[in-house]
Image (cartoon, coloured by chain):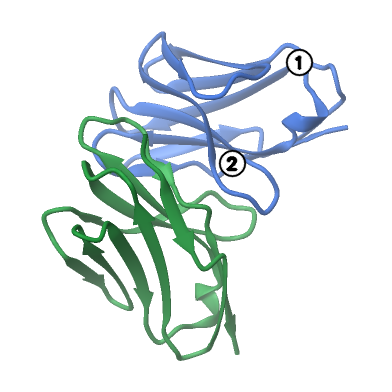
Amino acid sequence: GENVEQHPSTLSVQEGDSAVIKCTYSDSASNYFPWYKQELGKGPQLIIDIRSNVGEKKDQRIAVTLNKTAKHFSLHITETQPEDSAVYFCAARSFGNEKLTFGTGTRLTIIP
Amino acid sequence: SQTIHQWPATLVQPVGSPLSLECTVEGTSNPNLYWYRQAAGRGLQLLFYSVGIGQISSEVPQNLSASRPQDRQFILSSKKLLLSDSGFYLCAWSVSDEQFFGPGTRLTVL
């Protein structure tokens, strides 16, 4: 089955700087890669996703890149703000599979 | 627009007591439904998922069970809670690639 590894497990970034979280996946058939943001005491919120037919997707300050050859994808947050502090999860799913495989999460702390 | 509800929001139960958590989705039809558990400070563990009424797939053997009596209703149950059942229980739905989570139920077993 699919295995998703996520790094780093914790990340502290000065406000205004950029943050990058990386994930690798094992199943070359995976074609959908979402990212979730989970604030304390709340359910995870889908913030951006990418499909295997594109290499990069951007939405304001967040972007995701995908390298299918290397089987890794990354979340980039620019101009970080205190409200970006949260736990971020990556995930992967292959076509026809109803289940997402999640990474273990990254706790991002933005230092004012 | 679609919304997902979970109740109760918090629950404190004694060991050995029964459990029933409910999840309902509005604004969509025939969704895939999922139950996850999240231990404190940990990742997301898929417990059950359902692709239709009465169709339940179990991911992890445990003393929990799930049922889907209606298209947009998903219930998580236990006959006798264990201390290890404490955690944050999340319901989620999807009809295409995107999967959306509910607000969660915080369960504490004492």
> Which residue position holds label 2?
B104
Tell me: residue A76, above or below residue A101. Answer: below
Residue A30 location in percent, x, y?
Answer: 24, 44
Between B33 and A74, the one lying in front of the other is A74
Chain B shade: blue
Most distant residue in the left direction: A53
The reply, left or right, for residue A97 in relation to residue B46 is left
At 33% from the left and 53% from the top, the residue drawn is A34
Residue B18 bears which disc, if any? 1
Relative placement, left or right, of A80 versus A47 is: right
> Which residue lies at the image location 84% right of the left edge and 17% below the top edge?
B16
Color of chain A here? green
In which chain is the residue bearing label 1? B
Q: Are marks 2 and 1 on the same chain?
A: yes
Please state the horizontal and vertical placement of residue B107, each as a whole percent of the image.
Answer: 73, 35
- Choose between B6 and B39: the one closer to the eye: B39
Residue A111, numbered label: none
B73 on left or right of B87:
left
**Residue A31 horizontal/vertical position (percent):** 21, 46
Residue B102 visible somewhere in the drawing = yes
Q: Chain of mark 2?
A: B
Q: Along the polypeptide, which appears first: circle 2 or circle 1? A: 1
